[in-house]
Image (cartoon, rainbow, N blue to C red):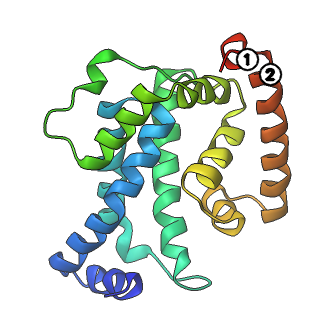
Amino acid sequence: MDIKELVEKSKNKDKEAFSELFDFYYDKIFNYSFRRTLNIDYAKDITSNTFLRVLKNLSNFRWKNGENSFNAWIYKIAANEINQYFRKQNKYRLSIDDSSFEIGDLGESVREIENRLENNGCLLILSRGMKQLKPIYQSILHLKYFEELSYAEISKILNKNENTIRVYSKRAIDELKVILEKDAIFENL
């Protein structure tokens, strides 16, 4: 089934269709949440809250501009949950806690992320640099380069004009370059 069909069946209380929708988006939303928070427990909570909000509000969802509108809608919910997490923290910070990297019974995608974090300090350096950016710039860069969403999708998620997103993206990259060039650890790579 395609996404549109799954969404429509889920709106009609089809549990199997919602389960398939959940399975299709779970890793995407979890990975997005994890890359923004760098904490497995927070990413799990954010992902759970995202799907609870999707389930609660699915009957209100309306298609706009084709099938990608659901993709933008679910990422918008996840972005709002992430922003709420940061507001609760009362500051924008990325923290890595050793306890967040216990493997246990976690999915393969989490293991892959952990391996990349352990094997490649570049992601940590990049995350440290990105946390110095404005929150809107952080969101745009994560959605564009980690989630590989189009500018049109990002504009829907963040409720901004597509041209504004393009300008902000360019500014964010320029600011991030300056930040990373000043980072002594980055120079040693």
In the picture as drawn, the residue positioned furthest to the left comes out as 105
| Marks 1 and 2 close (CB-CB < 8 Å) | yes
Amino acid carrying label 2: it is Glu
| Residue behind mark 1 | 187
The residue at 32%/68% (across/down) is 24
The residue at 78%/64% (across/down) is 162
Q: Position of residue 55 (x, y in %)?
A: 30, 65
Amino acid carrying label 1: it is Glu
Image-quadrant location for residue 74: bottom left
Image-quadrant location for residue 42: top left
In the picture as drawn, the residue positioned furthest to the front comes out as 189
Q: Position of residue 143 (x, y in %)?
A: 60, 52
How far apart marks 1 and 2 lie (CA) works out to: 7 Å
Name above or below for residue 59 compared with residue 127: below
The residue at 66%/35% (across/down) is 135
Image-quadrant location for residue 137: top right
Name above or below for residue 14 compared with residue 40: below
Q: Residues within 10 Å of mark 1 (few under 14, many from 20)?
A: few
The quadrant of the rendering that contains the N terminus is bottom left
- Mark number, residue 160: none
| Residue behind mark 2 | 181
Would residue 115 appear left or right of 170 to someone viewing this image? left
Report the label total: 2
Q: Position of residue 67 (x, y in %)?
A: 51, 83
In the picture as drawn, the residue positioned furthest to the top comes out as 184
SS at circle 2 = helix
SS at circle 1 = helix
